[in-house]
Image (cartoon, helix red, strand yellow):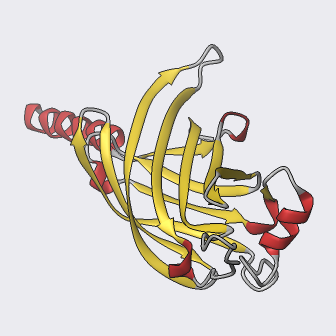
């Protein structure tokens, strides 16, 4: 009988340990999240924009980040640079060709710890049907309990890409030899998410 009770106790402990060790699922809180980008304009200033429509899957395991999974998709038609004419041009075949390639996707292939609350995300970014590897520092804050009893967590990843690598090549050369649109695009993904939603 004692042996049976000991076995049951061990199994119970293992079950609880497994439960807490499993990655936690989170749902993006769009009211407190942003996906933004910036690109040089005429060598003078930066044009900034964002995507308002996106989805994501987050499974986070802080104790074993390598078991975590992060992926997302941006809807190209939701691009917003505060100028409709420019937005329409960006959706056209000159740039993203939204009709043929309606989504931009990012899927992690590896997440590893670098320091306290610091990680490195390696993933595959697909734009306009072209997939390239990207590496980004990943900052994670939380989880914390909000006033309504929800567990919230915050993720931030910033990285740069060369748009030419993804077949986005439209440009014009100015009289001084400079380009109307820069090739380097800086991307800032800032996500707040709620556990178990």
170 or 154: nearer the viewer: 170
6 or 53: nearer the viewer: 53
- Residue drawn 87% across and 55% down? 83
Question: Quick check: 180 left or right of 113?
Answer: right
Q: Quadrant of the N terminus?
A: top left
Question: Quick check: 187 left or right of 18?
Answer: right
In the displayed orientation, state which residue is furthest to the front: 176
Q: Quadrant of the C terminus?
A: top right
In the displayed orientation, state which residue is furthest to the right: 84
Place of residue 43 in the rendered image (x, y in percent of width and height, measured from the top left): 61, 58
Question: Quick check: 128 left or right of 95?
Answer: left
- Residue drawn 69% across and 50% down? 48
Q: Is residue 45 above or below residue 3?
A: below
Place of residue 99 in the rendered image (x, y in percent of width and height, measured from the top left): 82, 82
Place of residue 114 in the rendered image (x, y in percent of width and height, measured from the top left): 22, 44
Place of residue 129 in the rendered image (x, y in percent of width and height, measured from the top left): 60, 85
- Residue drawn 30% across and 49% down? 65
Q: Is residue 179 above or below residue 99?
A: above
Splitting the image into 4 quarters, where does residue 93 fall? bottom right
Question: Quick check: 186 left or right of 147?
Answer: left
């Amino acid at each position: 009988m004692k042996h049976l009770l000991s076995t049951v106790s061990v199994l119970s402990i293992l079950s609880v340990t497994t439960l807490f060790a499993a990655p936690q699922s989170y749902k993006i809180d769009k009211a407190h999240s942003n996906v933004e980008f910036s690109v040089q304009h005429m060598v003078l200033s930066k044009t900034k924009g964002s995507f308002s429509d996106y989805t994501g899957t987050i499974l986070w395991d802080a104790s074993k980040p390598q078991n975590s999974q992060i992926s997302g998709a941006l809807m190209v038609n939701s691009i917003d640079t505060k100028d409709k004419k420019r937005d329409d041009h960006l959706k056209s075949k000159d740039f993203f060709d939204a009709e043929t390639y309606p989504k931009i996707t990012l899927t992690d292939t590896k997440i590893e710890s670098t320091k306290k609350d610091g990680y490195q995300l390696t993933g595959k970014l697909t734009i306009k049907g072209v997939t390239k590897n990207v590496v980004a520092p990943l900052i994670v804050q939380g989880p914390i309990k909000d006033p309504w009893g929800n567990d919230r967590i915050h993720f931030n990843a910033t990285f740069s890409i060369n748009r030419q690598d993804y077949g986005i090549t439209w440009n014009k050369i100015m009289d001084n030899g400079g380009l109307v649109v820069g090739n380097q695009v800086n991307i800032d993904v800032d996500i707040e998410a709620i556990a178990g939603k």
